[in-house]
Amino acid sequence: MARRKKIYEGKAKILYEGPEPGTLVQYFKDDATAFNAQKKDIIEGKGVLNNRLSEFFMTGLNGIGVPTHFMRRLNMREQLVRNCEIIPLEVIVRNYAAGSLSQRLGLEEGTQLPRPIVEYCYKDDSLNDPLVTEEHIAAFGWASQQDMDDILSLALRVNDFLSGVMLAVGIRLVDFKIEIGRIYEGDFMRLIVADEISPDSCRLWDIETGQKLDKDVFRRDLGNLTDAYSEVARRLGVMPRNATQMTKPTLIN
Ligand code: UDP
């Protein structure tokens, strides 16, 4: 069988050429990285959980008319997605202060923000994904003013959807990051939510206890990462506990 063509390999995912033009296969690895890959580990089962969780969130978004790149899940670690041109921005939405915002502005983590705050970072690992303003984005031509209006509206719709879904299972959506891609349909260009939505890219805190159920468990050495992600999946009814352990075929004697 011919090897498939690898299009791109990132820190947590690999993109392969898809079966039809305009599609890609997105493979979720078990690699966890933080602090621009200075901290690294392999967390068995993480990729399986993120594949399912991203499928769950993206399917929900597609269902309420927020377009995403997600087409369908192929297997435990792979999903078929639309090939899009990624805008080189990380779009961050914050409902409560945490992480870099807390550090930058001296806000205690968990402080409720007066309204959702949307921030943009320029996607460049060699520069540590610096925070940029709309002035930079316009001046360097990364996105037009119309794109930025559409991106803001997409980001806030994703925030409302995810906040509601998480609230229903006793989880506070503190903040998250999305990436946006362009797809071309004839003469038209559309912006869609791409990449992934998972506990790798969100901050999720238990509403009652404040327990962290996201990548901060890894970043800050707070315990077992797959346990945290499994808890999110279990509450959302996405997959049963321990299903992630079945990553390799087992021989039946
Ligand atoms: N985030 C991400 N990828 C990045 C940077 C941030 O997914 O490269 C997410 C992060 O998990 C959090 C939100 O974006 O949910 C805000 O992150 P922050 O700016 O506070 O950065 P951090 O403290 O994680 O460095």
Image: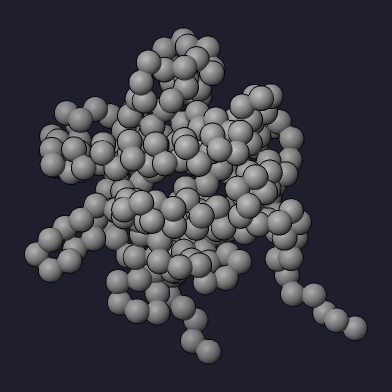
Q: Quadrant of the C terminus?
A: bottom right
Horizontal placement of 63 versus 28: left or right? Answer: left
Q: Position of residue 193 (x, y in %)?
A: 34, 51
Q: Position of residue 211 (x, y in %)?
A: 67, 28
Whether 102 is drawn above or below 16: the answer is above
Horizontal placement of 194 versus 164: left or right? Answer: left
Q: Position of residue 95 (x, y in %)?
A: 43, 25
Whether 111 is drawn above or below 230: the answer is above
Task: Name the colour scheme.
Answer: one colour
Horizontal placement of 211 versus 157: left or right? Answer: right
Depth check: give the residue in front, 104 or 50.
Answer: 50
Whether 20 is drawn above or below 224: the answer is below
Residue 229 visible within the image: no
Q: Residue furthest bottom?
A: 1
Horizontal placement of 157 versus 238: left or right? Answer: left
Which residue is rendered at x = 21% and y = 42% of the image?
150
Which residue is rendered at x = 20% and y = 30% of the image?
134
Residue 208 visible within the image: yes
Q: Residue furthest left?
A: 187
Which residue is rendered at x = 74% and y = 65% of the image?
246
